[in-house]
Amino acid sequence: MPCIGWGFRLPEPRRTCLRAGMAGAWLAVAVAAATAQERAEREYGLMVEGEGVEETYYTCTACHSEMIVVQQGKTREGWDKTLDWMIAEQGMPEPDPAERAKILDYLAANYNTDRPNFPRR
Amino acid sequence: MTDQKTTDDLRRLLAEDPEAADLALFGRVSHADRRGFLRGAGLAAMSTAVGMAIPYHRNIPQGFIPAAMAQGDPLAGKLGLILLSDRPVNAETPPELLDDDITPTDRHFIRNNGLLPDDMDPETWTLTIDGFVDTPLELSIADLREQFEVVSLALTLECGGNGRAFFDPPASGNQWTWGAVGCAEWTGVRLREVLDKAGVQANVVYTGHHGADTHLSGDPGKEPISRGMPIAKAMTDNILIAFAMNGADLHPMNGAPLRLVVPGWPGSCSQKWLTRIELRDQVHDGEKMGGDSYRVPAHPVAPGTEVPAEEFEIIERMPVKSVITFPANGAAPVTETEVRGHAWSGDRTIEAVDISTDFGATWMAAEVDPPLNDGAWQNWRASVVFPRPGYYEVWARARDSEGVMQPFAIDWNPKGYLNNAMHRVGLQVA
């Protein structure tokens, strides 16, 4: 959980990769580039590995970045409604029921309201 | 901060003077044949940046930035922003990088709903004004410059969802923390004057804005976003149809070559890549005008409440808010330091900013500047003395011209809008 309920996040040093660069500015550039590269090299980008990741990744990234997905924290019902909205209003093709269930299971397990995999910034 | 500052200086230099930047960044200088060379350390730096050795590095011209670094970078021309999403591109500014009185273009946040238009040519761009007007207009950017007074104003833009990351239960959307706000100097013509020229008919109640960005699905029949505002708001003198930002062309991610700038209202009212404004005899029904988009419950609700669609109302002005831009969260100042930041309140001014260094037990007034112009945020500062080294927090709360103060807690709503809870920074005072 990256924050507490009344609007304050506990202070923590941010972007240590930039701060730690005692060897000069170019190092910070290099570190930032490497981070983007790491994401590019991972099979499912920022999405965590797990049962259903492949179906989820390719369904979502047909239209938008997986970076949007991994920021969210929703219950299975909340994700179900999100898919309904994507299909009804955003031009997403309806997945078959088995695939839809697999995607919902993955999202509910990894991107629920307790935000176990909220991206580090 | 020093390293961040140096990086930023180099990146600015890269944009303005690639050869000088090349020398500073990679230690390369020109040969007579206009090819650069890399000294050992510079080659190592460039190789690290692209992730491997560069066998033909001797052929790389001076001022050349490897494509792996320069292309496909959603944050090209931006400095130190945090990327929330790369399709569509959304990025926010860490509070400590919002320290400037006027937000430089490279520090201004990006909030996109769709993909950039293929064509952003200012020479061929046209803006249509139609709907319930006496004379529909089709104006090029040159027409706008010639037919209307060109004005420059510092104007605050804040995303309606700024602060959404702190909602619990979480709210759907980009998880902005504090940095989806900025106050750049925008140059353009007043929307009011353009609407006056078209002739607003008596039955007009609302505007509808349209842009050239494309829907994520690729469907040309869909608009990513098309919002509007009440006609009374549209006739406010501080709303611009802008073609420049901080004295230069608009940044592509900030709506080049033409956009609306509607200060103090959710950023979504400030249509980017603006092509058309229709005047309507009813509330606009464009994309993200309905449902729960840019809407909040008409009455406060408990966190997690399911709110029926008919109980939502459209967000208009943004609430009173402030941000601490110095020192940065996690900084280690000495026992006496300046604390500073900005404060704003949509359609209002800031009367006071109070700060606390003892977890809210006592408060002191900061010095608050008047706004540069109507619609600009206000800069504030205070000198703080800590009694002894240790961990402190600086909290800031602003009060606006209607006497409304920032709250401690979030007024939760289903889509995570309007979080104006106080900002705080933690300091390791040495």
Image (cartoon, rainbow, N blue to C red):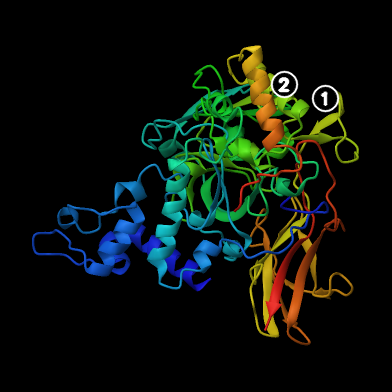
Residue beneath the point at 48% across and 43% down: B253
User: Of the residues tagged 1 and 2, which is closer to the observer?
Assistant: 1
Q: Which mark is residue A24?
A: none
Tell which circle, 1 or 2, labels the residue nearer the N-terminal end: 2
Q: Position of residue B153 (x, y in %)?
A: 58, 54
Q: Chain of mark 1?
A: B
Q: Is residue B227 above or below residue B77?
A: above
Q: Kindly identify the amino acid type of the residue bearing the numbered disc 1.
A: Ala
A99 or B59: nearer the eye?
A99
Furthest residue in direction left, as rendered: B33
**Neighbours of disc 1 within 10 Å: few (<14), some (14-19), many (20+):** few
Count of numbered circles in the view? 2
Quote the CA–CA distance across marks 1 and 2.
Answer: 23 Å
Q: Position of residue B317 (x, y in %)?
A: 75, 44
**Neighbours of disc 2 within 10 Å: few (<14), some (14-19), many (20+):** some
Q: Which mark is residue B281?
A: 2
Q: Chain of mark 2?
A: B
B196 or B372: nearer the eye?
B372
Q: Kindly identify the amino acid type of the residue bearing the numbered disc 2.
A: Asp
The secondary structure type at the circle numbered 2 is: loop
Q: Position of residue B229 (x, y in %)?
A: 70, 33
Residue beneath the point at 45% across and 73% down: A22
A57 or B371: nearer the eye?
A57
The residue indicated by pointer 1 is B309
A23 or B119: nearer the eye?
A23
Q: Residue B309 appears in which quarter of the rendering?
A: top right
